[in-house]
Amino acid sequence: MKVDETGEFRAALLRMKKKLSGPRLVRQNPPVSVATLDQVNEALRRLDDDSYGVCTGCFMVIPRGQLLMRPYADTCSDCAGRKRTPAPVS
């Protein structure tokens, strides 16, 4: 499925990449900036290989609204929630 036919997600990701690559932001919060920049670059790679918008956890389509809020998302909200939820301690 070609999610980015209009190029809107690519444009948003490229804007984010430019902003995150700025020296001021990198100096302010390096671990967060570098991690987010890595996610943005990975999302651009997924756009190129047509896997953008597909959850890496369950392989379902990530809802457009979620991608609009976080264009570098690689999981749907259900799978992202499972990643964050710690396993129960027995």
Image (cartoon, helix red, strand yellow):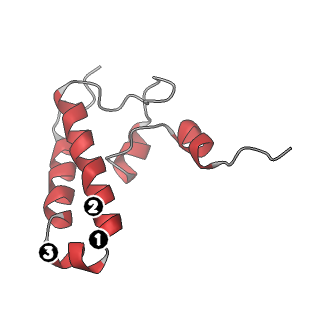
35 relative to 86, above or below: below
Q: Nearer the viewer, residue 13 or 42?
A: 42
Q: Looking at the figure, which quarter contains the C terminus?
A: top right
Q: Quadrant of residue 37?
A: bottom left
* Residue type pointed to by label 2: Val
Residue for badge 2: 34
* Residue type pointed to by label 3: Pro
The image position of residue 34, as x and y in percent, is: 27, 61
Q: How many neighbours does mark 3 have within 10 angstroms: few (below 14), some (14-19), or many (20 or more)?
A: few
Count of numbered circles in the view: 3
- Mark 1–mark 2 Cα distance, whole angstroms, equals 6 Å
The image position of residue 82, as x and y in percent, is: 62, 41
Decide: marks 1, 2 in contact (CB < 8 A)?
A: yes
Residue for badge 3: 23
Horizontally, residue 43 falls left or right of residue 90, namely left
Q: Nearer the viewer, residue 2 or 26?
A: 26
Instruction: Name the residue at 51% across, 25% down.
Output: 58
SS of the residue under disc 1? helix
Decide: marks 1, 3 in contact (CB < 8 A)?
A: no
Q: Quadrant of residue 9?
A: top left
Residue for badge 1: 30
61 relative to 64, above or below: above
Instruction: Name the residue at 25% across, 32% down.
Output: 46
* Residue type pointed to by label 1: Pro
The image position of residue 28, as x and y in percent, is: 28, 80
37 relative to 49, above or below: below
- Mark 2–mark 3 Cα distance, whole angstroms, equals 11 Å
SS of the residue under disc 3? helix
